Image (cartoon, rainbow, N blue to C red):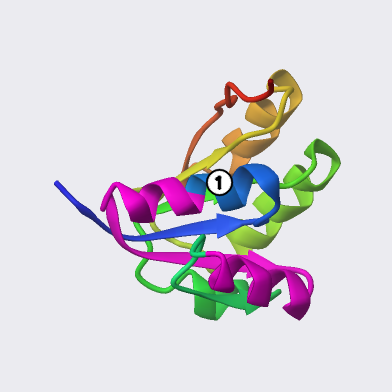
Amino acid sequence: MKIKRIAIIGTGLIGGSLGKAVLEKNIADQVIGVCRRQVSLTAAVKSGSLTTGYVNDYEEALKGVDIIVIATPVHAIKKILKNLADVLNDSKIIVTDVGSTKEEIVKYAAQFKDSFSFVGAHPLAGS
């Protein structure tokens, strides 16, 4: 089954690489980015990492998404999970992250189980 829309929050090295791979492998029809700065968003779209994106607009960016990947520094993940819980109300939407630590994040995300399904992850990246 092909994914229709995947959203990536944070389109730096890991988020951008993930978006590019998803598009190159034709895994999803759309890869939507959410960034803090327009310059980052523009660069990610230009590099082929995203099909489109939004600056800090979770509500618009997440309409109709199947999967959300949080690709930000670990210290920002809990705040983003709270933001997601404020705009999502579908426990079938999968939210995952690429942070390096898990226990605290997984425990925190559990309180939002009615808003989305959280699956903690960790990328294999590096030289």
Residue 84 x/y as whole percent: 60, 59
Residue 111 x/y as whole percent: 61, 40
- In this rendering, the answer to whether 112 lies above or below 4 is above
- In this rendering, the answer to whether 30 lies above or below 98 is below
The three-letter amino acid code for the residue at tag 1 is Ser
Nearest the camera: 58 or 49? 49
| Range of residues picked out in magenta | 19-47
User: In the image, what residue occupies the spot 42% across and 46% down?
Assistant: 21
Residue 60 x/y as whole percent: 52, 80
Residue 68 seen in the figure: no
Q: For mark 1, what is the residue?
A: 17
Estimate how packed mark 1 is, as few (under 14), some (14 to 19) or many (20 or more) residues with alpha carbons within 10 Å. some
Residue 34 x/y as whole percent: 62, 67
The answer to if 24 sits in the magenta stretch is yes
User: In the image, what residue occupies the spot 77% across and 69% down?
Assistant: 36
User: In the image, what residue occupies the spot 71% across and 74% down?
Assistant: 56
- In this rendering, the answer to whether 92 lies above or below 86 is above
Q: Is residue 5 left or right of residue 41?
A: left
Residue found at the very far left of the displayed protein:
1
Q: Is residue 51 left or right of residue 127?
A: left
SS at circle 1: helix
Rendered image quadrant of residue 54: bottom right
Residue 108 seen in the figure: yes
The answer to if 74 sits in the magenta stretch is no
